Amino acid sequence: MMLDRIFQGDCVAVLNSLPEKSVDVIFADPPYNLQLQGDLYRPNLTKVDAVNDAWDQFESLAAYDNFTRDWLTACRRVLKDTGTLWVIGTYHNIYRVGAILMDTGFWVLNEVVWEKNNPMPNFRGTRLTNAHETLIWAQKIKGARYTFNYHALKTGNEDKQMRSVWQLPVCTGKERLMINGEKAHTTQKPEALLYRVILSSTHPGDIVLDPFFGTGTSGAVAKRLRRHWIGIERDARYIEVAQARLDAVEPVAADRSVYAPSNKPRPPRLPFIRLLESGLLQPGQTLKLAKSDHCATVTADGALLFNGTRGSIHKIASQIYGARANGWTSWHYQDADADWKPIDTLRQQLREGKFTF
């Protein structure tokens, strides 16, 4: 299969010509079927540059549903069993796409809201300003292994878990591609959005396919991050713009490790009873809850006794605090020097192999 190239033609026909189970991730920005009724004007009577392209017009909702079903079915065929698909839309189409996506056999992993920092205002004042778009992230086969670079996103989010609301600006300024003073494409997506999508669900060398390539945002970001890409686009004008854009992209660093996600291996799960099995704690020993005078007794099977209640280190701590608590950091034991220390220090000793069990 030829990689890092744009295929011109109908997306379903091209997809059906590609090898089965050959693509790692698909990003799809299909027509939204906006169903605009007439032109839109600002209060100063200047015309809004709205989406009125022929490729966004369908004769009926049934026709749009059939189109959606066809391209999603074709995408599912070329996607690896471990692959995932991202599709973006607005209220005009995303609910129909989501239902058909599920009917086609995909399993939804997340819904992501792209909150636009600088949305187009609602000029008529008849509705709320549309300040977001929705992305659906789905896997091909429910329960199959798939790529999610959790720690890469967490690292990029100042070491906090990445949430499902992404605040990013729309495509403006130098990033917006123009031809003779007009937008090269009416719905060009910002590279920041694709950067996050590709970073989250691919590794260097993976293949990212975009069946509605447009001006090539997905391909440009994939190339920057040293992923392979495949674009499908039927409009020769868009292909020309996209190819020029892609030719100008060159990753700065040659070291593959620079582009690899910073996923950290998860430490082995160690149940509380391992501390008793290893002799680091003893049945009947007293533990003290941090920032309180509450104490509990350790049982032989790894539970705690507190005021007649028996439960896990997490359950008892949460019960006392009246809020969800991490028992490993909440409970303290008394060491040989009579100092109270978190039981998590004992767990860390086990993980480092300083004790056997």
Image (cartoon, grey):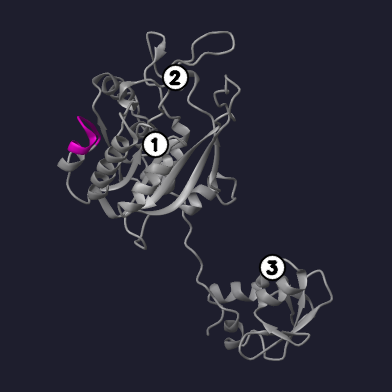
Across and down, in percent, residue 80 comes to: 26, 53
Q: Which residue is mark 2?
A: 50
Asked if residue 213 is positioned above or below residue 319 in the image, the reply reads above
Under circle 1, the secondary element is loop
Asked if residue 267 is positioned above or below residue 40 in the image, the reply reads below
Q: Which residue is mark 3?
A: 325
For this view, does 269 lie left or right of residue 315? left
Determine contact: label 1, label 3, CB under 8 Å.
no
- Badge 3 density bin: few <14, some 14–19, many ≥20, Cα 10 Å: some
- What range of the chain is rendered magenta? 4-14
Residue that sits furthest to the right in the current view: 293
Across and down, in percent, residue 14 comes to: 19, 37
Residue 3 falls in image quadrant: top left
Q: Which residue is mark 1?
A: 253
Amino acid marked by disc 2: Ala
Is residue 13 inside the magenta stretch? yes
State which tag comes first along the sequence, 1 or 3: 1
Question: What is the CA distance from the residue labelled 3 to the residue labelled 2?
Answer: 51 Å
Is residue 323 inside the magenta stretch? no
Residue lying at 72% horizontally and 91% vertically, measured from the top left: 284
Disc number lying in front (1 or 3): 3
Residue 187 falls in image quadrant: top left
Q: Nearer the viewer, residue 322 or 176?
A: 322
State which tag comes first along the sequence, 3 or 2: 2
Amino acid marked by disc 3: Ala
